[in-house]
Amino acid sequence: MDPIFHLLATNLYAKDERWRDEALFFSLLPDLGLLLITIYIFMYLPKNLTILDAYSMVPQAFVVLYFALHSLVVFAIAALVVWRLRPRLLPAMSAWLLHILIDIPVHAGMFATRFLYPVLPDVRFEGASWGEPWVLLAGYSALLILYVYSSWRERRKHYLRERWRADWLDRLVSRANALISRVRIHAADAKGQDIEGAAR
């Protein structure tokens, strides 16, 4: 889908100011390759080329970057590294995963999502192109429904207050908060004196 759709989809659930900006960044990250391809075409290639001819002439590195950033394999490796080094970024990285999952059914042709790249580089899903008006209409209609539901849920949660029973969304938020607030405990000496908690 287009960048605005990905931003709106991420904004729907990334409401915590501690990781909201990072989530919005990760929601656009997979399209970095496409951005470079588009800039190269407009700046360095003749204007009379067909779209297919133009895409075939861009640097292969840009295409590889596009496929890699839309890969569940690459995302999993990046998430494992972040989990070990900076777990507080994992909630924000969920926007990257969401971007890939949204794009799988709505990309086609040379930009069909190769979700197992580079392990199985030719495995791809030929979806319905988001360039089709009906796909855009369906996508934005689904987003509108989700925004209406989210607003209704928040109002109901505020109204019920103490009687509100935590649902799966509340549990996800709780786990995200736990990752963000994760504390590393280290001892200053072998006897355990002067133990200090330092947030990552």
Image: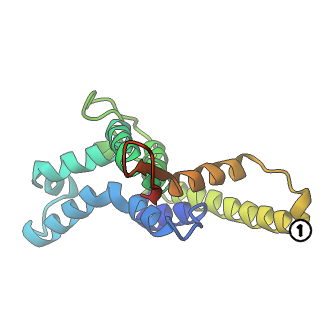
Residue linked to disc 1:
159
Q: Amino acid at mark 1?
A: Tyr
Q: Residue at x 28, y 60 (%)?
A: 32
Q: Is residue 134 left or right of residue 63?
A: right
Q: Is residue 68 visible?
A: yes
Above or below: residue 46 compared with residue 61: below
The answer to which quarter of the image holds residue 30 is: bottom left
- The total number of labels drawn is 1
Above or below: residue 187 compared with residue 146: above
Q: Is residue 101 left or right of residue 76?
A: right
Q: Give the percent coordinates (x, y) of residue 141.
A: 64, 61
Q: Give the percent coordinates (x, y) of residue 139.
A: 57, 56
Q: Is residue 138 left or right of residue 108?
A: right
Q: Is residue 94 left or right of residue 154?
A: left
Q: Is residue 93 visible?
A: no
Model colouring: rainbow
Q: Secondary structure at mark 1?
A: helix
Q: Tell me the quadrant of the picture where the N terminus can be found.
A: bottom left
Above or below: residue 110 compared with residue 122: below
Comparing 3 with 44, the one in front is 3
Q: Give the percent coordinates (x, y) of residue 174.
A: 65, 52
Comparing 117 with 159, the one in front is 159
Q: Residues within 10 Å of mark 1 (few under 14, many from 20)?
A: few
Q: Tell me the quadrant of the picture where the C terminus can be found.
A: bottom left
Q: Residue at x 43, y 55 (%)?
A: 89
Q: Give the percent coordinates (x, y) of residue 8.
A: 54, 66
Q: Residue at x 12, y 48 (%)?
A: 60
Q: Residue at x 15, y 57 (%)?
A: 54
